[in-house]
């Protein structure tokens, strides 16, 4: 009984696992943003960068620590070597606390805080860029799966149509109305259609694997995909799109923040040559002590640290920071140039894909008419099976090209949205 129940449960789980997951493009995007490890890693990096800002800002606040000290010494002993402080040691047990506060370092810490804040902001923009990358992967996989499913339907219809022709020609050949050569050609066409069907089935499974990975799933799933809405009107030129990309692309925003962070860090490195002023206060009690000591203690002091010479360390650090800021600036310029190029190329590709929609529709219509004429001529005995076979092949190719053109245009519009910075 238990074994039977276990088998039924396993069968139910297997059937559930094979149930296609109903999915729209918006739902796929939401699942990927929630589930994809690249998005999670980018968000964690941004959160870690925010903690660096808190770490650097901590220099503005007092540092407080408590101490408990006990000491025992031999009678009338002195430290003779190893120290330059007071060598006298008294037996004592003391507790207290110390407060240290930086008074000023002439802007070094404030520049470091601003640099780390800008770097954290750049990491947040990088997380947005990662989201866009993942969404582009989802669009590619989604439209690729839709195309594969459409080609599969074309292949199934082609097999059914050619099987019907094989049956008809075989019956005519048995009645001595068609030759065995016609039957052979028809069977060859059917075999080609079945080969197309096998490849299409494999492409569907591969596309589902791609889509599963894009959604952040480890295991492969099957999907029932919904056709997305048609994209809007394509802009007439790429000029406005390039201007939009310069403002909206998260990679550019990240590089600008990194450049500003590098400039603030360079300012902080220049402030190394300035003095730093800090204060310290300490106080406590001595519950157990020798008669020479009081039962309480307190002291305060101010320290001014003036750098004089350290082997050109600070000047080298300042030069390094300036040079690295210039490197980031040049990288920013290069990225702007590449984004301008990518937007232009994406617009051209989308425009070409849009033109292909009309051309492939005409091709499909002409191929369908040619097949009807070839079928009629063959039925009337005015042409050979070769002409009919070629017409069938042209019709199948036109259907596949037409399906590919539709989803290629959808994909190119998604790529254009990505290049403009609208895919977030």
Image: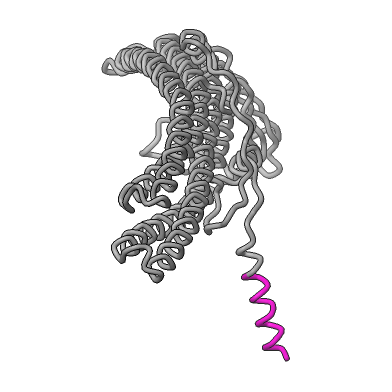
Give percent across and percent down for residue 369.
Answer: 46, 38
Q: Main secondary structure of the magenta part?
A: helix
169, 15: nearer the viewer: 169
Q: Is residue 144 visible?
A: yes
Residue closest to the far bottom:
1
Q: Is residue 169 magenta?
A: no
198, 396: nearer the viewer: 396
Residue closest to the far left:
311
Q: Is residue 6 magenta?
A: yes
31, 402: nearer the viewer: 402
Give percent across and percent down for residue 324.
Answer: 34, 17
Instruction: Locate the N terminus by quadrant.
Output: bottom right
Q: Is residue 386 left or right of residue 371?
A: left
State the residue at coordinates (46%, 41%). Answer: 399
Give percent across and percent down for residue 97.
Answer: 66, 33
Display coloring: one colour
State the residue at coordinates (61%, 29%). Answer: 230
Instruction: Locate the C terminus by quadrant.
Output: top right
Q: Is residue 308 left or right of residue 2?
A: left
Up/down of 71 relative to 292, above or below: below
Quadrant for residue 288, please give it: top right
Q: Is residue 78 visible?
A: no
Q: How many marks on residues?
A: 0
Up/down of 74 relative to 251, above or below: below
Q: Which residues are magenta?
A: 1-14
Give percent across and percent down for residue 34.
Answer: 63, 43
State the residue at coordinates (44%, 27%). Answer: 359
Up/down of 300 relative to 71, above or below: above
Up/down of 379 relative to 59, above or below: below
State the residue at coordinates (60%, 46%). Answer: 35
């Amino acid at each position: 009984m238990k074994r039977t129940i276990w088998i039924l449960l396993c069968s139910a789980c297997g059937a559930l696992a094979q149930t296609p997951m109903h999915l729209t493009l918006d739902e796929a995007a939401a699942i990927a943003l929630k589930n994809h490890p690249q998005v999670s890693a980018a968000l964690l990096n941004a959160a870690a960068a925010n903690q660096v800002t808190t770490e650097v800002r901590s220099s503005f606040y007092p540092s407080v620590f408590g101490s408990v000290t006990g000491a025992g010494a031999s009678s009338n002993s002195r430290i003779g070597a190893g120290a330059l402080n007071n060598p006298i040691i008294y037996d004592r047990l003391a507790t207290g606390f110390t407060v240290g506060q930086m008074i000023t370092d002439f802007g070094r810490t404030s520049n470091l805080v601003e640099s780390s804040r800008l770097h954290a902001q750049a990491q947040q923009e990088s997380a947005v860029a990662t989201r866009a990358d993942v969404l582009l992967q989802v669009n590619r996989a989604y439209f690729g799966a839709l195309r594969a499913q459409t080609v599969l339907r074309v292949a199934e219809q082609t097999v059914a149509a050619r099987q019907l022709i094989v049956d008809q020609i075989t019956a005519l050949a048995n009645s001595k109305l068609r030759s065995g050569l016609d039957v052979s050609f028809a069977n060859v066409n059917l075999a080609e259609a079945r080969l197309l069907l096998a490849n299409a089935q494999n492409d569907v499974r591969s596309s589902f694997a791609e889509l599963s990975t894009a959604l952040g799933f480890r295991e492969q799933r099957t999907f029932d995909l919904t056709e997305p809405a048609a994209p809007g009107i394509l802009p007439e030129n790429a000029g406005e799109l390039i201007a939009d990309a310069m403002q909206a692309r998260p990679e550019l925003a990240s590089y600008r923040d990194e450049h500003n962070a590098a400039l603030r860090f360079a300012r902080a490195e220049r402030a190394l040559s300035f003095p730093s002023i800090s204060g310290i206060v300490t106080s406590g009690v001595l519950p157990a002590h020798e008669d020479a000591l009081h039962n309480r203690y307190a002291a305060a002091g101010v320290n001014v640290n003036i750098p004089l010479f350290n082997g050109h360390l600070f000047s080298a650090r300042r030069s390094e920071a300036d040079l690295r800021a210039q490197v980031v600036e040049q990288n920013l310029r290069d990225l702007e140039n590449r984004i301008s190029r990518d937007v232009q190329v994406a617009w051209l590709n989308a425009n070409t894909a849009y033109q292909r929609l009309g051309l492939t529709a005409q091709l499909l219509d002409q191929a369908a008419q040619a097949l009807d004429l070839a079928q009629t001529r063959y039925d009337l005995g005015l042409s050979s099976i070769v002409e009919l076979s070629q017409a069938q092949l042209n019709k199948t190719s036109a259907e596949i090209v037409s399906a590919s053109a539709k989803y290629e245009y959808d994909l190119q519009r998604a790529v254009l949205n990505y290049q403009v910075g609208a895919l977030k």
